[in-house]
Amino acid sequence: MKIAYLDIETDYVGPFADKRLFRDHKNHHITILGLRLVEAAPEGISPEALQESNDQFFQFTGDQITRENLLLTLGGTGRIVTYNGRSLPDDVKRSVGFDFPVIAAQLGIVLDREFDHIDLVPECWRRGLYGGLKEVEKRLGLARQLPGKDGLWATQSWRKYQATGDKRLLDEVLLYNREDVYMLRAVELKLRSIPPVGR
């Protein structure tokens, strides 16, 4: 089964400066959409043992971010994995996430109605892990190659790139998004060895 790891970067253009901006999905313009496609390891084979040819990475920016490109890239995918991506309420806190609602508002497709989906946030909650992706990574002992950067930095860097055309800024944001996407699988694999609280 092919598994897709998905993460987006956005530029918020709406009126809110507080927590409401996270729910104002129609005013988040997607600047980068990153997707890693991995062939799930067959029973009895460790994920690390699979060939690199079974691991593909795609990034779309600007006008490349279309419903058609997304669905074409996801073709044959059995499951999507995100961190706080769900558009359907989870069964822990009955809350929705960010990525899929923004994609629904911008591209007109509700991904967790079209694909099997695992959101790592409720999976972390079940194991007593709370916070954003970077915080959870630290608690799990995962180290980033680009520490100290976050979504606000990505937005500001994207805006500077748009204003100046400086390709180095774009390259940095693309690397940041790529690391977000690759960390999804690293977190997922770490969580497999942590039993849910109370079990």
Image (spheres, rainbow, N blue to C red):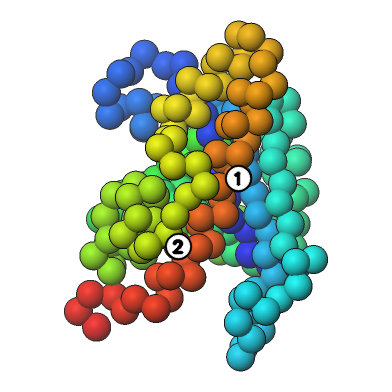
Amino acid residing under circle 2:
Val
Q: Which residue is mark 2?
A: 187
Task: Label 2: state its secondary structure.
Answer: helix
Q: From this view, report whether residue 37 is shown above or below residue 43.
A: above
Task: Label 1: state its secondary structure.
Answer: helix
Q: From this view, report whether residue 155 is shown above or below residue 97.
A: above
Q: Which residue is at 45% across, 62% downward?
A: 187
Q: Nearer the viewer, residue 110 or 168?
A: 168
Q: Quadrant of residue 113?
A: bottom right
Q: Residues within 10 Å of mark 2 (few under 14, many from 20)?
A: some
Q: Which residue is at 68% across, 13% downward?
A: 165
Q: From this view, report whether residue 51 is shown above or below residue 73.
A: below
Q: Which residue is at 52% across, 47% downward?
A: 145
Q: Which residue is mark 1?
A: 178
Left or right: residue 74 compared with residue 127: right
Q: Nearer the viewer, residue 178 or 12?
A: 178
Q: Nearer the viewer, residue 138 or 130?
A: 138
Closer to the chain start, of discs 1 and 2, is 1
- Image location (x, y in percent) of residue 19: 28, 29
- Image location (x, y in percent) of residue 61: 68, 30
Amino acid residing under circle 1:
Arg
Classify the position of the N terminus by image quarter.
bottom right
